[in-house]
Structures are given as structure tokens and as C-alpha cells.
């Protein structure tokens, strides 16, 4: 994961230098930006449903950058007392890192990390795949065939849980249960095996993706709470047309 720090620092320095140079040479100010044209429409599958990832005409992936936002403040999260104490312990230790940094899978909001991810809809298999090259180079499977969650001993706790999905209009709704207790969800927040995660993905146009996660874990929190973010053409995180994700091996620090 540390590999990305240097390129990001370089980019920030170059951006600052360019802005400084333009400010000195621009005289009375910057030239007016050209008016933005209409947003390109949402790509759709043959059956009319939104396609949240690449299409033959619009290949690409969603690139994530730090500062996407959408996280509640810690004092707004409805902790159980033990969960608050664990959160405070985790955030007070400079040498204590999230599992993702140590090449462990991350679920829910923590799955979506720099440098990016893809959403692959495979109607023939009735599945949607979420692919992320960061951290442990992981993927999630969302079953779209109407199956229920396993019950009892058949629901074995895992990092990603068991996910089923459905379409509500143009929104993909993903329902997940069966998580283990090794998660640092949405940062340093703890969870238990009672976690029930509901995620919503909406793509109102080609370069916009909205995400909401509702975290319902009565073992760790007194009520459900949520994380939200939106990627647009004007945010640092963007849809990269024609882009392809590169190989990053977490265990080798990307070397």
C-alpha cells in the first residue's frame, strides 16, 4: 500500500507548482472555463438496466483518491460502550494498522480503496462482481438469482459475508450477512457477526456513481448508521474512460 504515497505526493507538488505559475502569469486572473456540456447518459445493458461498470462503448474503471468523504464523525456514530472503547484504542495507536494495510480483505465501505475498482455485471451467470486491485487484490460476488442467504451452520462467517442483490428501479441494492469479527469497517469501526450490511449503487450518468452503506450491527451499535459518497466528473475520484487497472501485489508492496 505504501507504494502509492510517493506518486500522490509528486502529483500534489506538481499541481501546486502549476497553480502558482498560472497565478503569476495570468495577469488579471484565470481564463473563464468553458461551459460544461450535458452529462453523458447512463450506459445500459440490453435489458435496459444500468451498467455500473464498463460497456463495449465505454470501457473504464472507477479510480479512487483520498478525501472522498462520506464518513460520519466518530461522535455521530451510535457506539455500544465496548465498541467505542475499541475504536478509541485503534485510533490512538500509531503503529496499529487496518487489516487492509496488512493484506487482509475489507468489506463494505472499506472495500473501495485507492487506486480503484471495477463493477462487472454478468447477466448470463446472474452475478455481479466487485473487483479491487488495492490491498489483497480481492473481489466480491453478489448473487442476482433470487437465492436467500444460507441459514444456521450453513452461513459461515467470512470477511466479505454472503451477498445477494436486486434492482430497485435504477439502483442496485446489495444485502450482506455472515461476516466475521475481523473487520475494520469504514475505517477503524469494529463489527460483530451480527452485522447486516445494505449497500446501494446508483449511476445517474456515465461519470457519476453514488454509494450508500447502511451498517446495522446491534452487537456493536445502538442503531443503524450510514456511509455515503458520490464520484463525479469534478471530484478527485473519477471514472477513467478507457483506463485499465494494473497489477498490484499487496504482499510484495507492489514491487
Image (tube, rainbow, N blue to C red):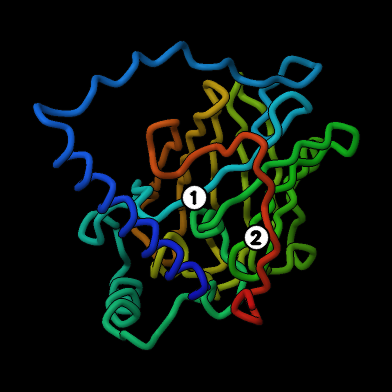
Specify the label residue 133 is tagged with.
Answer: 2
Residue 253's place in the image compared with 234, above or below, is below
Residue 207, image x and y in percent?
53, 29
**Left or right: where 237 falls relative to 95:** right
Q: How many marks?
A: 2
Tell me where residue 88 sits by quadrant. Answer: bottom left
Q: Residue at x 56, y 58 (%)?
A: 111
**Left or right: where 113 falls relative to 82:** right
- The residue tagged with tag 1: helix, strand or loop? loop
Residue 135, image x and y in percent?
59, 69
Q: Earlier in the sequence, mark 1 or mark 2?
A: 1
Specify the label residue 64 is tagged with.
Answer: 1
Classify 10 Å Cα crowding around label 2: few (below 14), some (14-19), many (20 and above): many
Judging depth in this view, the residue of 189 and 248 nearest the camera is: 248
Tell me where residue 50 sits by quadrant. Answer: top right
Classify 10 Å Cα crowding around label 1: few (below 14), some (14-19), many (20 and above): some
Amino acid at each position: 500500500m505504501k507504494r502509492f504515497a510517493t506518486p500522490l505526493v509528486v502529483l500534489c507538488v506538481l499541481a501546486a507548482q502549476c497553480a502558482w505559475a498560472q497565478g503569476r502569469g495570468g495577469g488579471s486572473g484565470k481564463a473563464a472555463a468553458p461551459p460544461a456540456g450535458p452529462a453523458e447518459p447512463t450506459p445500459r445493458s440490453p435489458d435496459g438496466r444500468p451498467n455500473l461498470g464498463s460497456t463495449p462503448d465505454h470501457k473504464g474503471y472507477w479510480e479512487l483518491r483520498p478525501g472522498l468523504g462520506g464518513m460520519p464523525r466518530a461522535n455521530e456514530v451510535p457506539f455500544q460502550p465496548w465498541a467505542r472503547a475499541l475504536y478509541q484504542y485503534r485510533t490512538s495507536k500509531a503503529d496499529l494498522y487496518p487489516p487492509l494495510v496488512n493484506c487482509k480483505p475489507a468489506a463494505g465501505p472499506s472495500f473501495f480503496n485507492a487506486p480503484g475498482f471495477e463493477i462487472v455485471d454478468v447477466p448470463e451467470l446472474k452475478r455481479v462482481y466487485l473487483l479491487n486491485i488495492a490491498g489483497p487484490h480481492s473481489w466480491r460476488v453478489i448473487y442476482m438469482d433470487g437465492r436467500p442467504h444460507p441459514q444456521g451452520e450453513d452461513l459461515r462467517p467470512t470477511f466479505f459475508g454472503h451477498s445477494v442483490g436486486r434492482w430497485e428501479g435504477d439502483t442496485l441494492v446489495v444485502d450482506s450477512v455472515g461476516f466475521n469479527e475481523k473487520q475494520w469497517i469504514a475505517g477503524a469501526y469494529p463489527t460483530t457477526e451480527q452485522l447486516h450490511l445494505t449497500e446501494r449503487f446508483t449511476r445517474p450518468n456515465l461519470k457519476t456513481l453514488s454509494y450508500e452503506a447502511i451498517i446495522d450491527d446491534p452487537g456493536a451499535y445502538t442503531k443503524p448508521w450510514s456511509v455515503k459518497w458520490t464520484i463525479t466528473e469534478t471530484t478527485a475520484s473519477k471514472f477513467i474512460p478507457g483506463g485499465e487497472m494494473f497489477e498490484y501485489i499487496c504482499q510484495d508492496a507492489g514491487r
